[in-house]
Image (cartoon, rainbow, N blue to C red):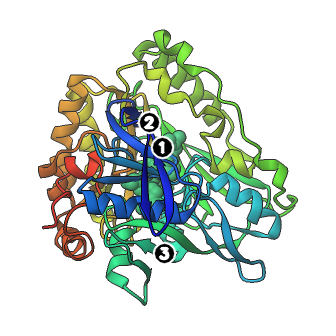
Amino acid sequence: MSRRGWRKGRAVTIDSSDIEFSGFSRTLKGKSACARPEKRAGAAALIGDCAASGRTLTVRGGGHSYGDAAFGRGGVVLDVSRLNRIHHADWTSGALIAEPGLTFRELFMIAGPKGFAPAVAPGFSAITIGGAFAMDVHGKNHRRAGGFSRCVRAIDLRLANGDLLHCSREENADIFAASAGGLGRTGAIERLHLALAPAPPSLMRQETIPVDGLGAALARLEENTGAASVVYWGDLLNARDADAVKGAVIAAAPDPAAPPIEAGDWAPLAAPPLGLLAPFYNELSNRAFNAAYGRKLRAARGGASVPLRAHLFTWDGLSAWNRLYGRRGFFEYQFVLPGEHKDRIGTILNRLIENGARPYLFAMKLMQAGEGLLSYGAKDGVSVLVDMPATARARAALDAADDAVADAGGRIHLAKDSRLGAAAFQRLYASSLSAFRAVVGRVDPDGVFASAMIARLGLDGAS
Ligand SMILES: Cc1cc2nc3c(=O)[nH]c(=O)nc-3n(C[C@H](O)[C@H](O)[C@H](O)COP(=O)(O)OP(=O)(O)OC[C@H]3O[C@@H](n4cnc5c(N)ncnc54)[C@H](O)[C@@H]3O)c2cc1C
């Protein structure tokens, strides 16, 4: 079945209405119609059609969000992955204007050899710059550099009424702030005006510092805030509790002796079929893996040179790791607490374990306050990430943990969420929700821009 939508003489094809979409965590699904226009005019025509006919529209970038942010239930998905052109590049200043479907891999491949790169990049290079802005994603350097929105000077936003609005920190600043991390609720980003930074070299020097216990891990992280990037990995699964966790802080700096980035460093990587291992992926095998990985990591104390791509985009060669969890999928619980309450992290983790969540993966990063109204971040914050199989017990444990995170003034990363309900979301995002709703009420009062996540979080209405 195919339908042609017409506006201003342009055509866009809407594919079959029963395409099934799923998030990366494989816990949520939804069926929608889908269009994948090649030109911005086609996208604009589809938005006009949806607004006129009362159909909701979900903008989709790479579709790599963990939950239901990039699809709807019913309505139309506007897949912008073919809108990936660069419209303007100034290779003296690093100013770049590009369409939203450009991926980080493409951006590094094109800008890297010219000596430029975004100062912030998420852990997977197939993510689009539009999706990265709409979730205001972070890298391993949030405390220093903030979220991806900091690399964006302005956006050209297609509104539900058809207008194309230039939004920046100076012009339509409230709409810019609502769109950074705004889940595509304010409109469809047609172009991003990026401010790229000088590119790092092709190798990073990584220093591994073994640490025992959560308190020591937090202290070592803070001691390394000056590093270009810093993260912590810990074996919580084999630990009695958070105080007994063993792990390592990994701090990195550009290797001054390394050659510059080359386009050949960014070829697509094949993903090994990790789903074949799903029958063997359980608590026992994860205990063994974590113990062996922890030993190897802690033994590697001191420095080692690592290719920039492996350092930044850790998941590029392992992009099918979500399939290890099998058909039921997994939860990634990523929460941030402000620095003044980071001493509560241990209690939250211990309660999760007591309540039956199995922390197969545990990592931490340093954060600052997020820029956008719904951005993930917190002042002097610490971001904690725990992965676990999506069981009913894990869900109940996480539901209970949401209250503790909200009580501490924390937030949950919506890019990773597939579980929050509207009430918990409202508690977690209370400080900026009314400002966000005020902008949405102005730019899209009829709720044209929507998604299953937007409905789940109670953001579909105008107020
Ligand atoms: C392996 C892996 C590693 C990851 N690592 C990190 C990490 O290190 N840090 C981090 O913060 N996140 C990380 N993520 C999460 C990921 O960065 C976010 O979910 C990101 O938003 C996905 O981008 P995407 O292009 O796939 O967008 P999608 O998932 O397709 O969309 C994300 C959101 O953006 C909206 N959107 C997309 N394009 C537009 C547009 N043009 N206009 C308006 N709205 C739009 C969508 O409606 C949706 O709400 C990771 C995800 C994976 C799968």
Q: Amino acid at mark 1?
A: His
Question: Is the residue at mark 2 in contact range of ligand 1, meaning its CB lies under 8 Å from it?
Answer: yes
Q: Where residue 253 sits in the image (x, y, percent)?
A: 69, 60
Between discs 2 and 3, the one toward the N terminus: 2
Residue at the spot of label 2 = 24
On screen, residue 281 versus residue 101, left or right, reads: left
Residue 218: percent from the left, percent from the top?
42, 53
Q: Earlier in the sequence, mark 2 or mark 1?
A: 2
**In this rendering, which labeled residue sits more in front, label 2 or label 3?**
3
Is the CB atom of the residue marked by disc 1 within 8 angstroms of ligand 1's nearest atom?
yes
Could you give the CA–CA distance between mark 2 and mark 1, rounded to whole angstroms?
6 Å
Query: Residue at the spot x=28%, y=47% of the render?
Result: 453
Residue position marked by numbered label 1 in the rendering: 64
Task: Please tell me whether mark 3 sits on a helix, a strand or a loop.
Answer: strand
Q: Residue at x 57, y 63 (%)?
A: 120
Depicted 110 relative to depicted 264: above or below: below
Residue density around tag 2, few if under 14, some if 14–19, many if 20 or more, within 10 Å: many
Is residue 151 placed above or below 184 in the rendered structure? below
Q: CA distance from mark 2 to mark 3?
A: 26 Å
Q: Which of 392 and 343 lies nearest the eye of the viewer?
A: 392
Neighbor class of circle 1 (other Cα within 10 Å; few <14, some 14-19, many 20+) is many
Q: Position of residue 90 (x, y in %)?
A: 74, 80
Is 356 placed above or below 73 here?
above
Question: Which numbered disc flags the more N-terminal residue, 3 or 1?
Answer: 1
Amino acid of disc 2: Phe
